[in-house]
Amino acid sequence: MNGLEKASSVLATRWAFTSILAAALALIVGGQANAQVTSADIVDGQVKTPDLASAAVTTSKIAGNAVTGAKIADNAVTSTKVQNNSLTGADIQDGSITTADISASTLTDINASELNGFKADELIRVGEAEVTQIVDLPSCSLLGLAYLTKTINVPFKGNVLVTAMFTTQASTTAVTSVAARVDHVDSVVQHGIWAEDHTAFSAPGQRSNLVSTELFAVEAGTSTLELRVCDASDTDQRAAAIRGKMTFVYTPNPPL
């Protein structure tokens, strides 16, 4: 075989090999193009935000409980993104809702006449009792005189604040001491503290005013309160009661 024939044979062989290689490569590339890219084909952490088309990630593509608070930007969740009636008290942080966050138009079906089950006229009740009568004062050693008595009726267990005022007048020129207090006299007697004046009088007709304030726990139903008054001695009619008054403020709430 001469040189020309050998060259032609080599070229033919190389052309056939190149054709076979090109055909094989076409089959490989074509097969890969038609195949789907699965998770196994992607290295972990290689799909970035720029690789995702807008709105490509839908709810069905997110695993349950996969989106935590740390993955949500501040202020990203607005009211339009929260399903109606999906938030309960357990979802709201204590003290996070202020007056400014509540629209007055949303406050419907609220009975403003009740608070903690109490009607408005049951939350606070007030009353008074008074007497004007000249009566000689007995000695304080005998617990004094029940000068004014008042029975009140309350709907619930609670507390009553009593403020008493008492005016007494001197009968002689002798200096004497006078006192007044409020007692709660029911099945269990609660004594108040004496309000005292030890230099009440220095001349006939002079007067002394005493004020006593007490807070008593009361049960539902009736409670009786007394204004008791007295002086240092009951031997010479040194002082006489002139007038007395008690005012009451009741509430079912516990004391401060």
Image (cartoon, rainbow, N blue to C red):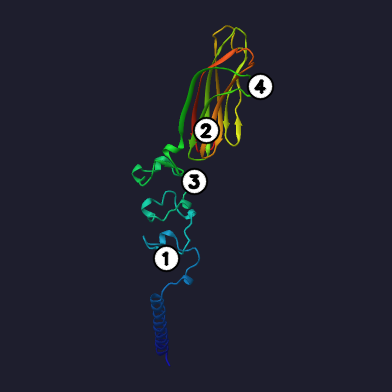
**Residue 7 at what x, y percent from top left?**
41, 86
> Which of the numbered marks, if any, corresponds to residue 160?
2
Depth check, front residue: 79 or 195: 195
Camera-near label (4 vs 2) is 4
Q: Secondary structure at mark 1?
A: helix
Q: Residues within 10 Å of mark 1 (few under 14, many from 20)?
A: few
Give the Cα distance between marks 1 and 4.
90 Å
Mark sitting earlier along the chain (1/4): 1
| Residue extending farthest left | 105
Mark sitting earlier along the chain (4/2): 4
Mark sitting earlier along the chain (1/3): 1
Identify the residue position indicated by label 3 in the image.
94
The residue type indicated by label 3 comes to Asp
| Residue extending farthest right | 141
Mark sitting earlier along the chain (3/4): 3
Q: Could you tell me which residue is drawn at 48 percent across and 54 percent down?
A: 69
Identify the residue position indicated by label 1 in the image.
61
Identify the residue position indicated by label 4 in the image.
141
